[in-house]
């Protein structure tokens, strides 16, 4: 298994009026299950405000994250797909899939990033993820 994700941390068919809302939406399951605090959500948004939309890793896909720290209670990931792609102001175009990565330390941060990269390459593409009609369908992509 390339990237562990809980069924409860998958959101399908979301909407967001801007990239900040897209990050908040994708992070909401992690706040709800107490993996991260609201402070971590703010840190992810501030990272993009400070460094630009570096989190848009490929066309249609953003990986929201911030540095490991006290606002990450448990390493975890969540993912949200958006009906209408969200503009992050990056040449890779609007984003229809936002994954949120939270890690308690730098080692697990790198391991998780590798797992996510393998999953994205192995699952066939961001389009395949964005096309999922329900969370079970998306969950099964991460089990391949």
Image (tube, rainbow, N blue to C red):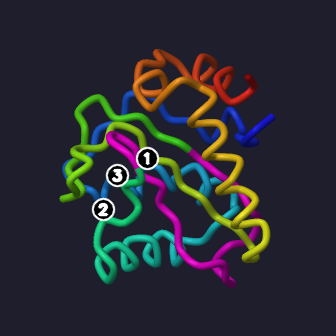
Q: Is residue 4 left or right of residue 128?
A: right
**Mark 1 = which residue?**
98
* Secondary structure mostly seen in the magenta stretch: loop
Where residue 82 sits, quadrant-wise, is top left
Give coordinates of residue 1: x percent, y percent.
81, 34
Badge 3: residue crowd in 10 Å (few <14, some 14–19, many ≥20): many
Are circles 2 and 3 on residues that touch, CB within 8 Å? yes
Q: Which residues are magenta?
A: 58-78
Element assignment for label 3? helix
Which mark is on residue 74?
none
Residue 45 sits inside the magenta stretch = no
Q: Residue at x 33, y 42 (%)?
A: 59
Query: Of the residues tagged 1 and 3, which is closer to the observer?
Result: 1
Closer to the chain start, of discs 1 and 3, is 3
Give coordinates of residue 70: x percent, y percent.
69, 84
**Mark 3 = which residue?**
22
Q: Residue at x 66, y 78 (%)?
A: 68
Where residue 13 sits, quadrant-wise, is top left
Which mark is on residue 20?
2
Residue 73 sits inside the magenta stretch = yes
Rendered position, 64 above or below 137: below
From mark 1 to mark 2, how far is it between C-alphas?
Answer: 11 Å
From mark 2 to mark 3, how far is it between C-alphas?
Answer: 5 Å
- Between 51 and 16, the one lying in front of the other is 51
Closer to the chain start, of discs 1 and 2, is 2
Q: Quadrant of the C terminus?
A: top right
Give coordinates of residue 66: x percent, y percent.
53, 74
């Amino acid at each position: 298994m390339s990237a562990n994700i809980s069924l409860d941390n998958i959101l399908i068919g979301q909407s967001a009026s801007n990239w900040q809302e897209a990050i908040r939406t994708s992070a909401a399951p992690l706040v709800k299950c107490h993996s991260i605090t609201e402070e971590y959500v703010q840190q992810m948004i501030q990272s993009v405000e400070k460094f630009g939309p570096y989190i848009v890793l490929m066309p249609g896909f953003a990986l929201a994250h911030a540095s490991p720290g006290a606002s990450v209670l448990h390493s975890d990931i969540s993912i949200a797909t958006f009906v209408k792609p969200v503009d992050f102001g990056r040449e890779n175009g609007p984003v229809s899939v936002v994954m949120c990565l939270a890690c308690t330390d730098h080692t697990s941060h790198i391991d998780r990033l590798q797992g996510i990269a393998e999953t994205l390459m192995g699952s066939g593409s961001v389009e395949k993820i964005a096309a999922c009609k329900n969370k079970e369908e998306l969950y099964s992509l991460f089990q391949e």
